[in-house]
Image (cartoon, rainbow, N blue to C red):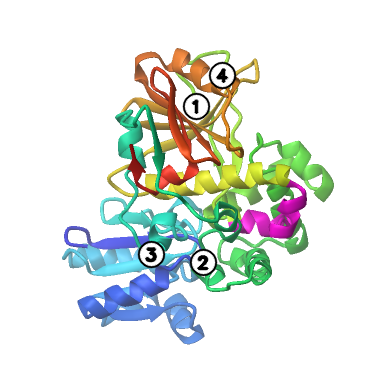
Amino acid sequence: MTDTRVVALVGPRQSGKTTLACQIARDRGMDYITLDEDQSRTFAKNDPAGFFRDLDRAVIDEIQRAPELILALKKTVDEDQRSGRFLITGSVDLFASSASPDSLAGRIETIELLPFSQSEIALSEPSVFMDRAFAADFPAYGKAVPVQGLTERVLAGGYPEALSRNDDSRQQSWLRSYAESLTTRDIADLHNVLKRNELSKLVRLSAAAAGNLVNLSRLSAPLGISANTVNQWLVLLEQMFLFRRVQAWHHNDHKRLVRSPKLHFLDSGLLAALRNIDTEGLRHHRSQFGILLECFVFSELAKIASVPRNRIQISHYRDKDKVEVDFVLEHKGQVVGIEVKASASVKSDDFTGLKRLKQTAGDAFMCGIILHDGERIQRAGERLFAMPVGTLWANITT
C-alpha cells in the first residue's frame, strides 16, 4: 500500500480477510465499508460514481457483490494517483472472472489470503521450506521437531471458524454448511446458475474425484448436464477458492507427458467433511487418509507459494507409463518434486516418480522429496530426500 493505488485482498469466505482489513482500516485511519450490508450494496450498484464522491481512503469489503464499482474505482484512482487509497477485498477471484468490467491493470496489486497455514496456527515464523528445497539444503540424516496430532491437523484444515470448534464433528458440520452456502448463495455474485442442486452435487462429486485427473465426462454424467457446463461450473468454483485444477508439468514439449490437470481442494478439512471422513472413520479405514494428506500438503504448499516473494508455480507430473509425482514446484526455471506418502516408512520404489522427473528435468532439477507420516529425515540418493510432513512448517534438527 506504500506504492500501489489499489490493493486487492482475495481469498475464500471465512479465511480472515475482513478481520485483517478492519485492522488495516483502524491502523491507517481509513473508512471501512462492507458490501454485505444491503444499504451500502444498493448505493454502490445504483450510483457507483456517487459512492466514491466523498471517499478519500477506504477499505471496501466484498467488492464482488457490486462489480459496478470497478470502473468508478478506476476513474477515481486515475484522477488522484496517491498510493494506498483503497484496499478492496473479495471472496472470489474477481479479476480472473467475467464479473469484473475492468482488470485495473497498472493500478492494482492482488494478494491472496488462504485459510491459516500450520505456521500461522502455531504462531511461529513463516515456513522456510521452499528456500531449503530449492537449495537442496537438508541434512543427510536427522529429524524434525516432533509434530503432534497430524491426523487432527489434516481433518481440521485451516478455516479460523472451523478451528474455533474443539469437537471434530462440530468442525465438519460447519464445513459442510460452508460448502452448501457457497453453492446456494455466494455463487449468485458471479453467475446466474439456475440448477443450484446440481451445483451442490458437483461439489460432492469433485470431492470424490479429488487428487485425480479431471474427467469432465465422468463428472457430468451423474448430473445429466453437458461436459461444457461442468467445465464452466468448475471455473466458477475455482474462482471461489474451493479447489484448483493443478496443471500438468511439461518440459520442452516432451511428448510422453500427460497434459490433463488434477483436481485438488484448497482445504483438507473441507475435503474431509465433504467425503464424510472423521477420526472414527480413519481409525477403521486408514486407507482414506492418503488423499486427505495429499490435499493437506497441497494446501500448505499453496499458502507458501502465494507469498509475493515466492511466486512458485505448482503442477503435477505424469507420463504415459503412469509414473507420477504429486507436485512439481517451479521457480525461476528450477524444479523441485514432492511426493506424499501416508506411511511412516519409505521404500526405494517410492522414489520411482522423482527419479523419472529428475531425468526429464535435467539440470533444472534441484531435489526430490517424499513427505511421509514419520519422524526421520534421510537422504536416499543424490538430491533425493525422505522427510516428515512436519518439515513443511517445523524446524529441522540434525
Task: Give the class, few, some or many, for how many residues have Cα within 10 Å of label 2's Cα (few <14, many ≥20).
Answer: many
The quadrant the C terminus occupies is top left
Question: Mark 3 or mark 4, which has the lower sequence index?
Answer: 3
Instruction: Please tell me whether mark 1 sits on a helix, a strand or a loop.
Output: loop
Q: Is residue 113 left or right of residue 85?
A: right
> How far apart, in angstroms, are the residues tagged by discs 2 and 4?
39 Å
Question: Mark 1 or mark 3, which has the lower sequence index?
Answer: 3
**373 falls in the magenta region:** no
Give coordinates of residue 268: x percent, y percent: 58, 53
Q: Is residue 177 left or right of residue 29?
A: right
Disc 1 vs disc 4: which is toward the camera? Answer: 4
Q: Nearer the viewer, residue 36 or 243?
A: 243
Q: Is residue 313 left or right of residue 354?
A: left
Q: Is residue 314 above or below residue 4?
A: above
The tag on residue 249 is 1
* Circle 2 residue: 13
Q: Residue at x 36, y 63 (%)?
A: 123
Give coordinates of residue 216: x percent, y percent: 71, 38
Q: Is residue 134 left or right of residue 186?
A: left
Q: Is residue 259 above or below residue 168?
A: above
Q: Which residues are magenta?
A: 269-285
Amino acid tagged 2: Arg
Q: Nearer the viewer, residue 113 or 60?
A: 113
Q: Are marks 3 and 4 in contact (CB under 8 Å)?
A: no
Give coordinates of residue 316: x percent, y percent: 53, 31
Q: Is residue 30 visible?
A: no
Instruction: Please tell me whether mark 4 sits on a helix, a strand or a loop.
Output: helix
Q: Residue at x 33, y 49 (%)?
A: 307
* Circle 3 residue: 70
The tag on residue 352 is 4
